[in-house]
Amino acid sequence: MTEHTITDASILSGWRKSSYSNSEAGSCVEVLDGYPSGVPVRDSKNPHGPALVIEPSAWSSFVSAVQDPHLGN
């Protein structure tokens, strides 16, 4: 069975924020590259909270959709 959550995301190192995030304490999502079960995603305001582990194909689809300049048209 594939792992879908990590209870305490702070146990992992190497989290990164989007290049679109600013340096202020706003609402940011962080991701972790190279995790074997998928792409962990967490709320930057709660680093000790849970992380969702997204399947790589679903993450790629999400990123492609967000980068599509015609999204919503």
Image (cartoon, grey):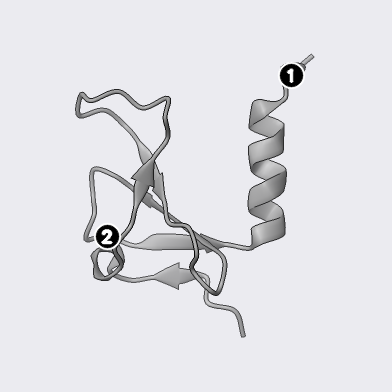
Residue at x 69%, y 54% (from the top left corner): 58
The disc label shown at residue 49, or none: 2
Q: Residues within 10 Å of mark 2 (few under 14, many from 20)?
A: some
Task: Say which mark, if any, is on residue 72.
Answer: 1
Residue 73 vertical position relative to residue 43 in the rendered view, above or below: above
Tell me how far mark 1 sits from mark 2, CA to CA.
32 Å
In this picture, residue 67 sits left or right of residue 5: right
Outermost residue on the top side: it is 73
Q: Residue at x 48, y 58 (%)?
A: 33
Foreground: 11 or 1?
Answer: 11
Displayed quadrant of residue 55 = bottom right
Dot 2 falls on a residue whose secondary structure is loop
Q: Quadrant of the C terminus?
A: top right
Give the number of callouts: 2
- Circle nearer the N terminus (1, 2): 2
Question: Identity of the amino acid at label 2?
Answer: Gly
Q: Quadrant of the N terminus?
A: bottom right
- Which residue is rendered at x = 23% and y = 43% of the image? 45
* Vertical position of residue 25 compared to residue 9: above or below: above
Residue 6 drawn at (x, y percent): 39, 70
Task: Indicate the secondary structure of the residue bearing disc 1.
Answer: loop
Side (left or right) of 7 relative to 69: left
x and y, in percent, of residue 52 in the image = 46, 60
Q: Amino acid at mark 1?
A: Gly
Residue 35, given in percent of the width and then of the height, sits at 48, 68
Residue 8: where, in percent of width, then height?
A: 27, 69
What residue is rendered at 71% in x and 33% in y?
65
Q: Is residue 60 left or right of residue 10?
A: right
Instruction: Answer with the quarter of the image where residue 9 lies.
Output: bottom left
